[in-house]
Image: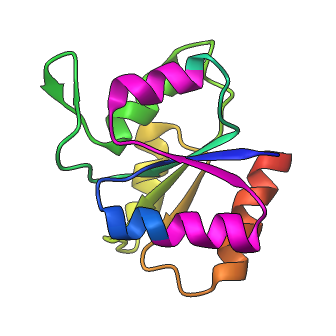
Amino acid sequence: MKTVLIVEDDLINARVFSKILTKRGGLAVKHTEDVDEVMQMAQNHEVDVILMDVSLAHSMYQGKPVDGIKITQMLKADPVTADLPVILVTAHAMDGDRENFLAQSGADDYISKPVVDHQAFVNQITAIIDG
């Protein structure tokens, strides 16, 4: 079974995503906003894809605040985790934001909140896992 890591500081969003992915997608789900945990799970190949919230309010790494873009950059810069697909999730999607976020972070794809079409959401994630 494939595992999705949800990096999200809004627990309601995390629950909604978890429910869609497990019930409709048949995927296993982990959730954390602890950046050390994210890095560890990625380095240990415990997850197959990361759903990364762009605006993490509380996340710190090595004493500095980090957002989803920064965490994605760190993952993509490390040869051990560079191939792990990261999908950015954000509620603030203006035209051009998507391209900017993807270019800045090196992420593989992008999803806007709120997720309205649950099946399309699942399909987008499984397509990336299956490469």
The answer to whether residue 81 is left or right of residue 94 is right
Give coordinates of residue 44: x percent, y percent.
Answer: 62, 17
Q: What residue is at 39 percent from the left and 68 percent from the top?
A: 13
Q: What residue is at 17 percent from the left and 43 percent from the top?
A: 58
Q: Is residue 11 magenta?
A: no
Of 125 and 31, nearer the camera is 31
Give the residues drawn in magenta, as a range: 16-42
Give coordinates of residue 117: x percent, y percent.
Answer: 62, 86
Q: What residue is at 49 percent from the left and 73 percent from the top?
A: 16
In the rendered image, the vertical position of residue 85 relative to residue 25, given as above or below: above
Q: Can residue 19 be seen here?
A: yes
Of 79 and 42, nearer the camera is 42
Majority secondary structure of magenta residues? helix
The answer to whether residue 130 is left or right of residue 45 is right
Give coordinates of residue 123: x percent, y percent.
Answer: 77, 69
Give coordinates of residue 14: x percent, y percent.
Answer: 43, 62
Of 4 and 97, nearer the camera is 4
Q: Is residue 38 magenta?
A: yes
